[in-house]
Amino acid sequence: MTKWTALFAGLVLSATSAFAQRVAPPDLGLSIWVPKGWSLSYLGGGSDFRYYSMNDTTGVHGAWFQFEVYSGTYNTSGSSFGWVNDEALVREYILQGDCYGVLLSDDTMRVDGAYAREVYGRSAICDSSSTQLLSPMQDRYYRITGLGDIGWVMSIEGDTADIDSASSTYLAVMDSVKLSLTFSQIPAVGVQVHPSRSMRPKRMVADNKGISVMTETNSVPEISVVDLQGRMVAGRVSSGGNGVWNWRPDQSNPGLVVIRVRSGSAQWVDRAVLPR
């Protein structure tokens, strides 16, 4: 039993009767039980990645799931094993990137026989000049795995109190995920786009000057960049027009970074390599 699931070892996972149907998006490479009253939405993607989210539309449960699939693990990390470990490290930095953030568990497991890592932590936004919290405490749990040239990140994020009270439901949904063991390539054209309940930036790209973010909004987003040593990278944000926002570093800081974008209550996280 892993450290995170051990936190809820006394709970009985009896949510099967609440499940409505098993859904298998053809470009995600996995299937998931979608509980009655929940919605699985396509958020966007590209030639080598796809993003989906799932949430309870009835308002009973406040946390949301995110399902990500990537191709090219051989090119980025040399193997699916290396990619899983690299991605787990990135998610740990994401967890600890807020003003207050703590990693509570990092463990290994198996998903349909594939090597996986699970990362669990707690964070909140706080006043940088004091310890006053400016947001509710949030729990984040990542389950990261891969097969061949494909990698998946499955995550749960929500208010700490909600995660604690509904942990049996959330764990049952997460454990219902089944990988498509024959999935080897993300199709060129994804499934039909369904509108998500909240706006989230659709894509980030790195160019020879910095990072460009497509948010589809004219409101200035908050863009935070953290390097692999956990240090904030200073930079400035400017409008590129038509909902595109450009982030440029104040000084040269090449290498892999984690980017978090906030626009109102919505947020999006990705990683990129800054140019030399």
Image (cartoon, grey):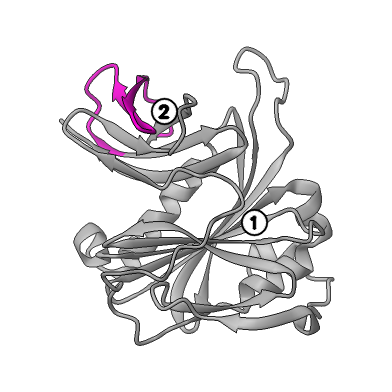
Q: Quadrant of residue 250?
A: top left
Please give the label number shown on residue 64.
Answer: 1
Label 1 and label 2: CA atoms lie apart by 28 Å
Image position of 96 (left or right of 46):
right
Q: Residues within 10 Å of mark 2 (few under 14, many from 20)?
A: few
Q: Residues within 10 Å of mark 1 (few under 14, many from 20)?
A: some
| Residue of label 2 | 231
Residue 5 lies in the magenta stretch: no
Q: Secondary structure at mark 2?
A: loop
Residue in view at x 43 percent, y 79 percent: 114
Farthest bottom residue in view:
182
Magenta region, residue range: 229-256
Q: Nearer the viewer, mark 1 or mark 2?
A: 1
Question: Which residue type does callout 2 highlight?
Answer: Arg
- Residue 18 appears in the figure: yes
Question: Which residue type does callout 1 highlight?
Answer: Trp
Where residue 49 appears, as percent x and y from the top left, is 34, 61
Residue in view at x 69 percent, y 67 percent: 38
Vertical order, 240 against 261 (above or below): above
Residue in view at x 47 percent, y 24 percent: 220
Where residue 188 appears, as percent x and y from the top left, is 26, 70
